Image: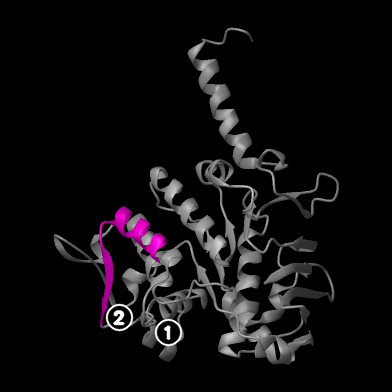
């Protein structure tokens, strides 16, 4: 699993190091504190073990800087500067380190420096998936061939998620743990997913419904069902999910957190970024003693203005907690209005 990720002068980060839980890692923080950037880097370094792409090439495709000039990923500053991403991964008793170093004058990935156990890293394959904020399965028909043949401005996370979803389902009996999660999802979305010619449908007693006719929240649940059914999310895999709450009814947050905790118990390492109070609170309410959940609060240091992180396994000790603060402010304002300003 991924145990640590560090940045120096990379995108928004001056210097940042995050120690990761082998279970669930929840990133919170205001806009512009780098939550999505962390998820993209983790996904890129996991994906290259399967795709066999160069780390620099994958980072470039996942971030897609202007004109694909990888040097633009270095934190902006006057003069020459060098940025880096370093990731540490445990494979059994072995600890592997991979470091990407790029100059702000570097134009192509081939000129970036990759240090560490590059060969060993790609020898040990790691299944991974990145679920972006934008739902893609309804746009799947023809998208892969379009991306392969034409220059279109889509970060590679989008064709990648379509590729993962179109994998054939696993053969053989489904183990009890996977069956439990699949049944929860089938109940909530009222059906199962079928795929015909790269087109996704939800099939239930009323018939087959194309994804373009479904609420986007249902499509998100359906995507999870597909990834579990086709074996992408199994023991030893990594899930990166950016804002699971997007377009999801708050009532479904309980189900999403229940499923994420179950996946973690199956051995899936999870990284997610959220702005949602309900999702965050559901983790607090549903976590049990054996669950391995770390909350990472990203914020700008008051003195330096640079992004820093505080990590805790206790919801009450998330500091700062912009989500909780915003919710508390709403409650205070509502009480103040209902009391007509009394007590001021």
Element marked by disc 2: loop
What residue is rendered at 25% in x and 61% in y?
Answer: 191
Bounds of the magenta segment = 179-196
The mark tally for this picture is 2
User: To which residue does mark 1 refer?
Assistant: 147
Please say whether residue 14 is one of the residues in the magenta stretch: no
| Residue 108 visible in the current orientation | no
Q: Which part of the image, by quadrant, shows the N terminus?
A: bottom right
| Residue 326 visible in the current orientation | yes
Chief secondary structure of the magenta portion: helix
User: Which numbered disc, 1 or 2, marks the residue that appears first in the sequence?
Assistant: 1
Query: Which label is found at residue 273?
Result: none
In-front residue for pair 312/180: 180
Q: Is residue 291 left or right of residue 306?
A: left
Relative to 250, residue 22 above or below: below
Please say whether residue 182 is one of the residues in the magenta stretch: yes
Quadrant housing residue 142:
bottom left
Give percent across and percent down for residue 295.
67, 51
Q: Which part of the image, by quadrant, shows the C terminus?
A: top right
Q: Please tell me how crowded label 1 is: few (under 14), some (14-19), or many (20+) other residues with Cα within 10 Å.
A: some
């Amino acid at each position: 699993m991924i145990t640590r990720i560090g940045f120096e002068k990379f995108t928004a980060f001056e210097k940042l190091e995050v120690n990761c839980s082998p279970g669930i890692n929840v990133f919170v923080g205001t806009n512009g504190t780098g939550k999505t950037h962390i998820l993209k880097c983790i996904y890129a370094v996991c994906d290259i073990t399967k795709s066999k792409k160069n780390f620099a090439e994958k980072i470039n495709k996942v971030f897609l800087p202007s004109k694909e000039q990888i040097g633009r990923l270095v934190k902006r500053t006057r003069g020459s500067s060098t940025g880096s991403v370093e990731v540490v991964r445990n494979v059994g008793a072995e600890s592997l380190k991979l470091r990407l170093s790029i100059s702000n004058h570097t134009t192509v990935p081939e000129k970036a420096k990759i240090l560490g156990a590059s060969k060993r890293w790609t020898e040990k394959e790691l299944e991974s998936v990145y679920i972006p904020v934008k739902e893609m399965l309804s746009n799947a028909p023809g998208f892969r061939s379009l991306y392969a043949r034409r220059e279109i401005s889509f970060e590679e996370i989008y064709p990648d998620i379509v590729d993962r979803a179109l994998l054939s389902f696993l053969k053989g009996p489904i183990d009890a743990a996977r069956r439990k999660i699949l049944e929860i999802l089938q109940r909530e979305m009222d059906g199962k997913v079928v795929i015909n010619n790269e087109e996704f449908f939800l099939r239930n007693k009323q018939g087959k419904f194309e994804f373009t006719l479904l609420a986007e929240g249902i499509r998100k649940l359906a995507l999870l069902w597909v990834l579990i059914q086709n074996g992408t999310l199994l023991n030893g895999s990594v899930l990166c999910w950016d804002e699971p709450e997007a377009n999801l009814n708050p009532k479904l947050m309980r189900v999403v957190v229940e499923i994420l905790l179950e996946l973690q118990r199956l051995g899936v390492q999870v990284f997610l970024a959220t702005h949602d109070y309900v999702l965050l609170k559901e983790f607090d309410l549903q976590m049990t003693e054996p669950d391995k959940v770390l909350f990472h609060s990203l914020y700008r240091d008051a003195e330096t203005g640079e992004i820093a992180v505080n990590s805790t396994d206790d919801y009450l000790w998330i500091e700062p907690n912009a989500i909780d603060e915003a919710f508390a402010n709403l409650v205070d304002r509502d009480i103040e209005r209902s009391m007509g300003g009394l007590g001021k």
